[in-house]
Amino acid sequence: MTERIAICPGSFDPVTLGHEDIVRRSLAFADRVVVAVGHRATQQKQGLFSIAERREMIDAVFADEPRIESADFTGLLVDFARTRNARLLVKGVRAVSDFEYEFGMALMNRELADDLETVFLMPDVQHSFLSASLVREVASLGGDVSQFVSPLVLERLRERNSGGAS
């Protein structure tokens, strides 16, 4: 039987408990999950954390699960999925607006690679409003984000927002 590999793509700036929930639940139908941090040439803004730092945090957060690995990619997601022999893309959707955007992306990906399926997962209700951008904003203003990220990510956010090196 062929190994079922899923790609869970995103920016993960930073990885949140909502991301963790979606990735871990993906193991219910995938043998291995690649958490893929995308380089976004079309995005103007600079991330809070570098791609390497995001991958380090992802690797640390999922260190207890050998079936989860991090990677980064440039270009088309479907091309990256082919290099990993993945047949599944896993996307978390929190609201109708997320679904509309992701639905369009899934249809385009199907046109580009008809053997690649997209699976949408709803977040756990406690994470249904959570986004990395909200976490970044609240943390930058000194708010407590400890209920939204792992302790390791919380520490990195505090270091970054206090001006310390990470």
Image: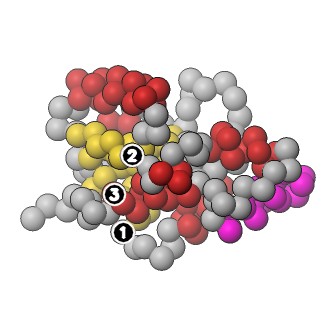
In-front residue for pair 128/10: 128
* Image position of 162 (left or right of 136): right
Q: Amino acid at mark 2?
A: Met
- 145 in magenta: no
* Quarter of the figure that contains the N terminus: bottom left
In the rendered image, the residue lying farthest to the front is: 125
The answer to whether marks 1 and 3 mark residues whose Cβ atoms lie closer than 8 Å is no
Which colouring convention does the figure follow? secondary structure
Q: Which mark is residue 158?
A: none
> How far across and down, in percent of the image, does residue 99 sit?
39, 30
- 162 in magenta: yes
> How far across and down, in percent of the image, does residue 128 sit?
51, 45
Q: Secondary structure at mark 3?
A: helix
Q: In front of the other: label 1 or label 3?
A: 3
Q: CA distance from mark 1 to mark 3?
A: 11 Å
Identify the residue shown where x is 39% and y is 46%.
122
Q: Amino acid at mark 1?
A: Arg
Q: Which residues are magenta?
A: 151-166
Q: Secondary structure at mark 2?
A: loop
Q: Which residue is mark 2?
A: 122
Question: Compared with residue 117, is residue 44 higher up or lower down, i.e. above or below?
Answer: above
Q: Which mark is residue 26?
A: 3
Query: Is residue 54 something that shows in the picture?
Result: no
Q: CA distance from mark 2 to mark 3?
A: 11 Å
Q: First in sequence: mark 2 or mark 1?
A: 1
* Quarter of the figure that contains the C terminus: bottom right
Q: Secondary structure at mark 1?
A: loop
Q: Which residue is mark 1?
A: 67
> How far across and down, in percent of the image, does residue 86 sit?
27, 49
Q: In front of the other: label 2 or label 1?
A: 2
Question: Compared with residue 123, is residue 1 higher up or lower down, i.e. above or below?
Answer: below
Query: Is residue 28 something that shows in the picture?
Result: yes
